[in-house]
Amino acid sequence: MCGIAGILTARQDLELTPILDGMVRAIRHRGPDDEGYEELALPGGYRLGLANTRLAILDLSAAGHQPMTDSASGSWITHNGEVYNHMSLRPQIPDASFRSTSDTETILKGWVRLGHSFLASLRGMYAFALYDARRRQFYLVRDRLGVKPLYVSQVGNDTWVFASEVRALLGTGLISGCLDSAGLNSYLAFGAVSAPWTLLDGIESVLPGEYWRFNFDQSERDLRPERVQYWRPPFDGDVGPPLGHAEAAQGLRPVLVEAVSLRMVSDVPVGVFLSGGIDSSAVVDALASKGHQLHTFSVVFGERQYDESEYSRLIARHFGTKHTELHLSPAQVVDEYERALNAYDQPSIDGINSYFISQVTRQAGLKVALSGLGGDELFAGYSYFRLMSRLEKKWPRRMAWLVYQLLCRKSPNSIRTQKLGAILKDGVSRLRRYTVCREVMTDSRRAAVSAGMYNGKVAPIPASVRGALESQAGGLDPVNAHSLFELSLYMANMLLRDTDQMSSAHALEVREPLLDHVLVEAVAHLPGRLKLHSGRQRSAKALLVDALPTKLPRQILHRRKMGFVLPWERWLRHELKEQVASVLSDQAALETTRLAPRGVEAIWTAFLAGDPGVRYTDVLSLVHLLHWVRRHRLKAPPKGSEPEHEMAGLN
């Protein structure tokens, strides 16, 4: 893992070194082992500045220094991430001689000789900027699933800046620092902004599976990239020949084991995050089958309803791992909360847990850890997968209406009742049902907290993303459609972004083997019915469980599902109450975000009173946003930049 940054410009009056230096200062935490700068003169009078902060994982020597050049062609690269199969690709690169065992050198020399078609061979997580001198082209590239981030901003017609984090772009001094209205609306809806939007005006994200290509033409002074979507999660209506459950699981087993084993490629020790759930246990199972001696890590709480230590200890004993626990007390959270909030590059409601598990792993001396992220999204692990499948059938839908009527009588103001009612409305699309499930703030709450600026007539997902998802999902069964939504939205915009920024705060690299693109492709081509457990004897995510090389303990397979959630309900009402109240009453931050003080106060008061219609996520979304705005001294959205009402919205 590293941090990358750079500037591409046609201007001759810009001093590139101070700009690069400002970006590096902002992302130095991502790569404390080494850093470097390069300034290049390109054809047509263009100039390119590249920078890198390095966390040395593969080839710890000076030969892995970045930015890196291919001296034979004059091409350059700055790279963040890991390509796990890079050594096996080297024999396929004609006439290449290597001076390191770095994956960065493999990417560079493979690209120089084979062009962008070399992307199809890469198996890993990556974001890189590459100048291809032979073809007179410059590329910004992001990996297929969006594990590694890449942000871009255009400054005038002749300059682009790019980096691993938005705070690095703020560090250039070229960005206004104004909030973005569309991004704010999206953030309030989901607790994390939907890409390619960001929370900052003029900054956007390169999408997962996308590259931007700049061609240098002396007759054209405007720098206008061609944006190419080179990969999407390959869900389609054609699921191939009919398979039974056992046959499908058997076919997945070697793909799964290979995906996990590849992530052990490292010149430094590798640990594993272990919650005791099926996903992280599956990672341990696959690695143990290959004889790896593992060091596992978990978080332990005093609040028993949140504590999973019984199960993580069981897996650690079962597979004989060296196991380290972080005992997280309310006092520790209070002491560390501000530093954890400072780690956000963009805020969300779900990153603090990753901050603490990353902290204890790094303190144990490790630079790399494996995570079970992706199992629920790929193997239909969330309960709503079954609900959505049933709602497309006549009789289960009628039963759902009866349940809704009962809930209206018993708890009409609860979030569960409101969401079920929205899902059951006639004419609601699959994507809209999905977004209702994932919404943090309902349409009415967003309208109240923003004095009517954001409401149901303002879509919280970019139109281009909505259109692509709705088009692809139209021919899918309901399970695969919602798996597509999960991977493209919740996973990419919240879970992966949070994992990257919070692990980066501790200079830790996190790898997600269940998001290996070869594994994703194999699972995507299976019918949704194989991904739902059936009958009382089957565990959740039975397809994943049965694809494992050995059997997991019965207690793990049939335990109650728990997410990795901190005890926010208690902490916000007690230990963190004073800190939270201070942030929520910050008048300057409220004015900057254009949030209504009375609306914010109403949410906080209702939460403290135990109102079932207000959850801790409502509070966290506001606290984390306001703290982030205050820390970075941001400005209000430009006047007249309110997002346009889209009457169709998400129907």
Image: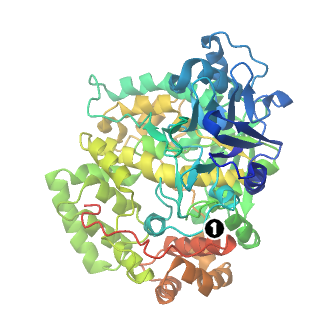
Q: Position of residue 563 (x, y in %)?
A: 53, 56
Looking at the image, residue 299 lies above or below residue 619: above
In this orientation, which residue lies closer to the viewer: 150 or 136?
Answer: 136
User: Residue at left 45%, top 40%?
Assistant: 227
User: Residue at left 33%, top 47%?
Assistant: 469
**Is residue 584 in view from this perspective?**
yes
Look at the numbered disc 1 and give the secondary structure of its residue. Answer: loop
Number of numbered discs visible in the structure rendering: 1
Q: In the rendered view, does 649 fall on the left or right side of 84?
A: left
Q: In the rendered view, does 435 fall on the left or right side of 283?
A: left
Which of the 4 image quadrants contains residue 326?
Answer: bottom right
In this orientation, which residue lies closer to the viewer: 565 or 639?
Answer: 639
Q: Position of residue 50 (x, y in %)?
A: 71, 42
Residue picked out by circle 1: 303
Looking at the image, residue 257 lies above or below residue 321: above
Q: Position of residue 238 (x, y in %)?
A: 26, 29
Which of the 4 image quadrants contains residue 408?
Answer: bottom left
Q: Look at label 1 and name its amino acid.
A: Glu
Q: In the rendered view, does 602 fall on the left or right side of 127?
A: left
